[in-house]
Image (cartoon, rainbow, N blue to C red):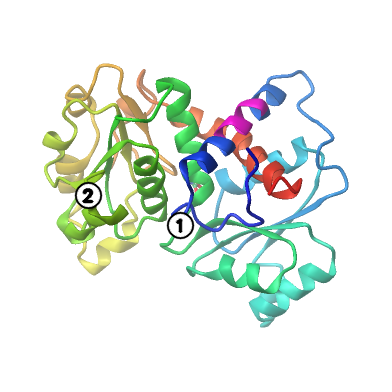
Amino acid sequence: MPLHRRHLIDVADFSRDEFDTVLDTAVSMRQVLDRPIRRVPTLRGKSIVNMFFEPSTRTRVSFELAGKSLSADVINVAASGSSVEKGESLVDTFHTIQALGADMVIIRHACAGVPDLAARHLDCGVVNAGDGLRGHPSQALLDLFTVREHAGDLEGLKMVIVGDMLHSRVARSDIWAFARMGAHVYLSGPPTVLPPDFGNLLNGDGMVRVEYDLDRAIEGADVVMALRIQKERMAGGLLPDLREYARRWGINPARLRRADRQVLLMHPGPMNQGIEISSEVAYGEQSVITEQVTNGVAVRMAILYLLLTGAH
Ligand code: CP
């Protein structure tokens, strides 16, 4: 089934079929990456511009590798070194990128809504690589892919996401994606950064629940995802000190034993080891954190392929 979209701005309005389309396409893309020569000519002649106005390692590099594996020309633009530094407006920058002939622009920005703004001003496709606190759709897709590879089906899985929900674009996108695919999503973390109404996401249909007691939330979980503690939030008094946070909401071996024996441990990265996740479990048997990073390339190849080949 084709993806009837030109842009990937958010996953909040994705249907199950659309998620499946991207995930199924990513399976084929991973086969390309498993070959001795990891390149196909599918997007030869297309130009992809990576515009990252915030730091990134995983997302930026994997979009670059994804584009190059499909034989597209990939150009990287960072805020520092671009004319934005000289005061050029974002809209003027978009018009400039358009005039240079881009077929796809991939944008990360600290402000929510910048990818929507780009989509309004550009004739080419736009992919949101993380905007403010709003969304990180390609991360949600690679997280779904990683779990589906292990579990086969997402329907009925118990997933726990733990951390600062209020300031996490990854959490927002993952909650939508996993709940839409039939998983039961439990949210845990300090009440100051986990408002009770997060349980009403997806129209309060019971797929998303808030449980402040992590030991209770994690009981029998199939998937546990720890979110990065954004230390800058602590200054505002929103989070307890790091030791207290690790004690109550950190993922460690004892806590993980309360989950299902086959539990998958995830983290979108970058990690603060010893705070939201202990070093023993971060690279332990149950961790799929490195797989998440690897799968990011195949999933982003699928996104670029589906949006750029007119399969919409
Ligand atoms: N998960 C994620 O977005 O990582 P980067 O900030 O390194 O891209």
Q: Position of residue 274 (x, y in %)?
A: 29, 38
Residue at image mark 2? 242
The nearer-to-camera label among 2 and 1 is 1
Residue 61 seen from this side: yes
Q: Position of residue 154 (x, y in %)?
A: 38, 30
Q: Is residue 261 above or below residue 302?
A: above
Q: Residue at x 31, y 26 (%)?
A: 281
Residue at image mark 1? 135
Q: Position of residue 305 (x, y in %)?
A: 71, 42
In depth, the one of 235 and 68 nearer the eye is 68
Q: Is residue 70 above or below residue 14?
A: above
Magenta stretch in the rendered image? 23-28
Q: Residue at x 32, y 40 (%)?
A: 226
User: Are discs 2 and 1 less than 8 Å apart at CB?
Assistant: no
Residue 296 seen from this side: no
Q: Residues within 10 Å of mark 1 (few under 14, many from 20)?
A: many
Lateral position of residue 189 relative to residue 172, left or right = left
In depth, the one of 205 and 151 nearer the eye is 205
In what element is the residue under mark 1? loop
Q: Residue at x 22, y 26 (%)?
A: 256
Q: Position of residue 294 (x, y in %)?
A: 56, 31
Q: Which residue type does callout 1 highlight?
A: Gly
Q: Which residue type does callout 2 highlight?
A: Leu
Question: Image quadrant for the N terminus?
Answer: top right
> Quarter-wise, where is residue 162 in the image?
top left
Lateral position of residue 192 relative to residue 84, left or right = left
